[in-house]
Image: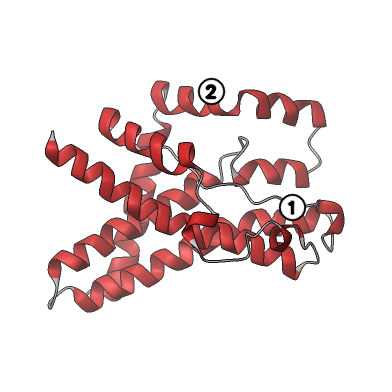
């Protein structure tokens, strides 16, 4: 049981560190596209405390790791005003995609570090491998079209009916829990993240 707690704490800490560049990427992209809302709300920073959602970043991930071995979590959403963004809804789509894209970039960087440390520091290299997998998992998970995840913003950008989006937003948390517990969605995302990790490691580990 101690090992389970240690694993849960380690994964939550890694996840928290990965959500920081993810949310920063949303904020930075929004500001670059003309919306100062993230800057005004203190989100244009790499300070992890500015981006933590205590339920979604700490409590829920720890519980899901302990109870199921799966992973469910998110960072504190970055607020944007699509009408201040250049391109409006197209700009909103770019802001939404910036977060998952940052996690793919982070995963590539972590895989490179893992390759560099494979011989000299295998334990640290293995930690980087875990972080690579989790970063890819975060990118995939956030593309689900369910509020508050980034994929839901693509629905808005595609001009999905407001009524449908509002209903999804009302039950988004419940839908995520049900999807993770009653379907193979979590297994599929974990498998996809492992496949991506193996691909990246294949590029950098010799």
Percent position of residue 141, x then y? 48, 44
Q: Secondary structure at mark 2?
A: helix
Q: At 14% from the left edge and 64% from the top edge, which residue is drawn?
A: 123
- Crowding at label 2, few (<14), some or many (≥20) Cα neighbours within 10 Å? few
User: Which circle, 1 or 2, is nearer the viewer?
Assistant: 1
Q: Of residues 89 and 171, which is closer to you in this image?
A: 171
Q: At 25% from the left edge and 70% from the top edge, which residue is drawn?
A: 114
Question: Pointer 2: what residue?
Answer: 174
Q: Where residue 59 is drawn, which disc sits there?
A: none
Q: At 49% from the left edge and 52% from the top edge, which residue is drawn?
A: 139
Tag 1–tag 2 contact (CB < 8 Å): no
Residue 187 falls left or right of residue 40: left
Up/down of 167 relative to 6, above or below: above
Question: Pointer 1: what residue?
Answer: 80
Up/down of 19 relative to 199, above or below: above
Any part of residue 206 in sight: no
Percent position of residue 164, x then y? 75, 27
């Amino acid at each position: 049981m101690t090992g389970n707690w240690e694993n849960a704490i380690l994964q939550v800490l890694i996840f928290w560190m990965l959500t920081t560049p993810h949310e920063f990427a949303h904020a930075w992209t929004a500001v670059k596209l003309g919306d100062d809302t993230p800057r005004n709300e203190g989100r244009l920073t790499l300070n992890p405390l500015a981006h933590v959602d205590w339920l979604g970043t700490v409590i829920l991930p720890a519980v899901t790791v302990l109870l199921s071995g799966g992973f469910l979590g998110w960072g504190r959403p970055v607020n944007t005003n699509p009408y201040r963004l250049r391109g409006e809804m197209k700009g909103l789509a770019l802001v939404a995609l910036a977060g998952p894209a940052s996690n793919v970039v982070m995963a590539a960087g972590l895989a490179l570090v893992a390759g560099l440390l494979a011989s000299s520091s295998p334990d640290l290299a293995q930690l980087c491998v875990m972080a690579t997998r989790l970063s890819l998992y975060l990118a995939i998970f956030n593309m689900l079209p369910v509020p508050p995840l980034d994929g839901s913003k693509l629905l808005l950008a595609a001009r999905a009916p407001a009524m449908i989006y509002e209903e999804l937003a009302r039950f988004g948390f419940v839908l995520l829990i049900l999807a993770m517990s009653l379907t193979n969605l979590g297994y599929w995302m974990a498998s996809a993240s492992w496949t991506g990790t193996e691909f990246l490691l294949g590029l950098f580990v010799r």
